[in-house]
Image (spheres, helix red, strand yellow):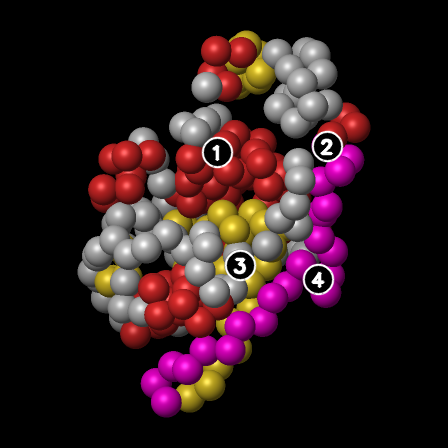
């Protein structure tokens, strides 16, 4: 595990080496060379439009993503999700906050931040919900409550990783349930990676069906 190389600087944990190339560094997670390899998305490519059938109407969900899902970021996200390295959320949230600042996102009309849920058995196995860890710094920065009990994953299905676009949609159909009335509530919905959009679209539908007025969706990468 990467944790054995961690050093502490101003209450933050940093590895003693670049997590991509292994070069020795004094702080942060990547050396300057590897950090430059991360592809920051700019308009219009930072936006993805998803077509959704909702209440017998076709609607468009626009999702904002900060980075392109390729190396060295791809391996770091895998480490974050599957190798119990939650400290990387601090590093990733910088990209998300920077992107939201670039597009001049105004949080004043929003009521709270909601992470895409993970089933409780997966949280127990993984130790955390990665979407929640990404959402916390955003909620803190925008001074909004983080609500991790609004929407839940009610059952486990097969991993999305190796499924086709059609299978991904089938896999998450009916997976999420919203437990509260959200009438007239405006929500910021946060996830880690946008692939086909099946997961975030299904969450959006579940929140909308409970009365959510406006839902702004953002992910770390796509």
Q: Which residue is mark 4?
A: 45
Q: Nearer the viewer, mark 4 or mark 1?
A: 1
- Mark closer to the chain start, 2 or 3: 2
Asked if disc 3 and disc 4 are in contact, CB closer than 8 Å, the reply is no
Residue 158 point in image, percent of width and height: 32, 55
- Mark identifier at residue 35: 2
- Mark closer to the chain start, 4 or 2: 2
Q: Which residues are magenta?
A: 35-56
* Front residue of 141 and 65: 65
User: From mark 4 to mark 2, how far is it between C-alphas?
Assistant: 20 Å
Position of residue 13 relative to residue 192, above or below, is above
Q: Within the image, what quadrant is residue 187 found in?
A: bottom left
Q: Is residue 135 visible?
A: yes
Residue at horizontal 58 percent and vertical 16 percent from the top: 15
- Mark closer to the chain start, 4 or 1: 4
- Mark closer to the chain start, 2 or 1: 2
Q: Give the class, few, some or many, for how many residues have Cα within 10 Å of label 3's Cα (few <14, many ≥20).
A: some
Q: Residue furthest bottom?
A: 56
User: From mark 2 to mark 3, how far is it between C-alphas?
Assistant: 22 Å
Asked if disc 4 and disc 1 are in contact, CB closer than 8 Å, the reply is no
Q: Is residue 152 left or right of residue 61?
A: left
Q: Is residue 22 left or right of residue 122?
A: right
Residue 45 on the magenta span = yes
- Mark identifier at residue 209: none
What kind of element bears circle 2? helix
Residue 69 point in image, percent of width and height: 62, 48
Asked if disc 1 and disc 3 are in contact, CB closer than 8 Å, the reply is no
Q: Which residue is mark 3?
A: 195
């Amino acid at each position: 595990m990467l944790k054995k190389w961690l050093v502490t600087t101003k209450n933050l944990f940093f590895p003693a080496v670049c997590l991509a190339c292994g070069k020795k560094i004094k702080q942060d997670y990547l050396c300057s060379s590897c950090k430059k390899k991360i592809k920051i998305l700019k308009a219009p490519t930072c936006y993805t439009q998803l077509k959704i059938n909702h209440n017998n109407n076709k609607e468009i969900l626009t999702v904002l993503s900060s980075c392109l899902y390729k190396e060295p970021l791809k391996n770091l996200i895998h480490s974050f999700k599957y190798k119990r390295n939650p400290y990387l959320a601090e590093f990733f949230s910088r990209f998300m906050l920077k992107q939201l600042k670039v597009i001049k996102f105004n949080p004043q009309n929003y009521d709270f931040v909601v992470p895409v849920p993970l089933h409780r058995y997966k949280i127990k196995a993984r130790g955390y919900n990665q979407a929640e860890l990404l959402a916390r710094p955003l909620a803190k920065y925008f001074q909004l409550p983080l609500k991790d009990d609004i929407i839940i994953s009610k059952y486990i299905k097969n991993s999305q990783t190796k499924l086709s676009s059609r299978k991904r949609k089938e896999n998450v159909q009916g997976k999420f349930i919203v437990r509260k009335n959200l009438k007239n509530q405006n929500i910021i919905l946060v996830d880690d990676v946008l692939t086909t959009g099946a997961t975030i679209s299904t969450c959006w539908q579940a929140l909308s069906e409970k009365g959510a007025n406006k839902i702004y969706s953002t992910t770390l990468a796509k």
